[in-house]
Amino acid sequence: MATEPVNIFEYEEIARERIEKGHYDFIAGGATDEITIRRTRAVFDSIMLRPRMMVDVDQRSMATTVLGQEIALPVMLDPAGNHSAAHPEAEIATVKAAGAAGTLMVLSSHASRTLEDVAESASGPLWFQQYFFKDRGLTLEMAARAEEAGYSAICMTLDAKIKPKRERNIRNDYVGGDSPNYAQLDLGTHTWKFAADAPAGPSDIRDVASTWDDLDWFASNIRLPVVVKGIMAGEDGRLSAENGAKGVIVSNHGGRYLDTTPATIEVLPEVVRAVDGNAEVYLDGGIRRGTDVFKALALGARSVLMGRPLFWGLAVDGEAGVRAVLDLLRDELDATMGMCGCSDVESISSAMIDTVSPLLAAFPTAAEFR
Ligand SMILES: Cc1cc2nc3c(=O)[nH]c(=O)nc-3n(C[C@H](O)[C@H](O)[C@H](O)COP(=O)(O)O)c2cc1C
């Protein structure tokens, strides 16, 4: 019997044994009843593929570009704080694995290593994730630091203004740590509360009052392109592009903030339509299989990102574990593309998926019965 985990779910099973319970629950868990987390898997599982035969798929490529930078596969690494909860080499291990797989990592501003140290270990493209701070100077300073260190875009997380209710963390009295990325900043009387992964109150440096005008201001005042993260409505996709975003990540923060939102794949078509080609659209949330990546691309995502599986890979085998997780997705996507008659990512289309059983066509509709 093979001893290595053969899929990402098995990585999580092993990781669960190895990561301290408070950290594991913080990583795996979500807001209130975790309905969105479960729904996300259920929706991916309910989308069916329509395989096509006798297409020459001898030469297949998963390569694509994001904001003009080439990546070997349409799977990027989501920003997620504190990788040291899963492995002592933390984000250094993760960024090496991303580079080896030929893809891009988005570094969380709440990483357990400085953005400069992570950039030094990177061999692939990097984006830096941050928030709107109440102090506008600090917001620009953080972006400038990332630019100086070689990051090629700023990912602004929009959906983390309000403190979420995470019941596992409450039960565990979970207290996280601080990030060295804030140590160099002069925060004055403001603080950063990692424990809740959310603003703690008036002293928090994050700006709960920020609006689309602030996005426009930010995008006009930094040199790097801006990608926004946390879009779950077509209107907000349109407003992001109108206010300077070059990329839009359809995301519900992995179900960690607001519970009972739809799965991201359910709102992806609406956002793609509203953005109307004025920005690139990406998706995250629940990506665990190559078929999930294929379905997101079929519905208009340019690339996907994944969060929790990075921790599962790290906990099992550090850099090699993250690499293995990325390799699993790559191999599964490659096989899916081949069996659906796609030689490259451009040829993946909505004609290759279905959400309604073809069997329904064999039955009269309810209206016909009446
Ligand atoms: C432990 C953990 C920490 C996270 N920290 C951040 C963060 O600092 N900034 C951010 O924008 N998103 C953060 N996220 C959300 C991820 O970027 C991403 O949206 C989510 O994990 C995607 O869902 P998935 O985990 O099902 O792949 C975090 C997620 C997890 C699991």
Image: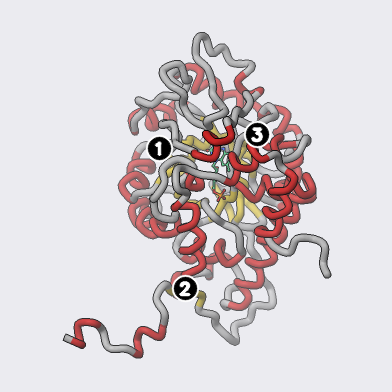
- How crowded is the residue under tag 2: few (<14 C-alpha within 10 Å), some, or many (20+)? some
Label 1 CB sits under 8 Å from any ligand 1 atom: no
Residue 249 is at least partly visible in this image = no
> SS for tag 1?
loop
Locate residue 124 relative to residue 224 in the image: left or right: right
**Looking at the image, residue 161 lies above or below residue 63:** above
Residue 123, image x, y percentages: 74, 42
Which residue appears at 39% of the width and 48% of the height? 232
Tag shown at residue 82: 3
Image coords of residue 357 (percent x, y): 41, 79
- Ligand 1 near label 3 (Cβ, under 8 Å)? yes
Category of crowding for the residue at label 1, using alpha-carbon neighbours closer than 10 angstroms: few (below 14), some (14–19), many (at least 20): many
Q: Is residue 354 above or below residue 187?
A: below
Q: Position of residue 305 (x, y in %)?
A: 57, 50
Which quadrant: the N terminus? Answer: bottom right
Q: In this figure, which residue is indicated by the disc labeled 2?
A: 353
Q: Residue at x 35, y 90 (%)?
A: 362
Quarter of the rendering containing residue 29: top right
Q: Earlier in the sequence, mark 2 or mark 1?
A: 1
Gap in angstroms between the C-alphas marked 1 and 3: 29 Å
Q: Nearer the viewer, mark 1 or mark 3?
A: 3
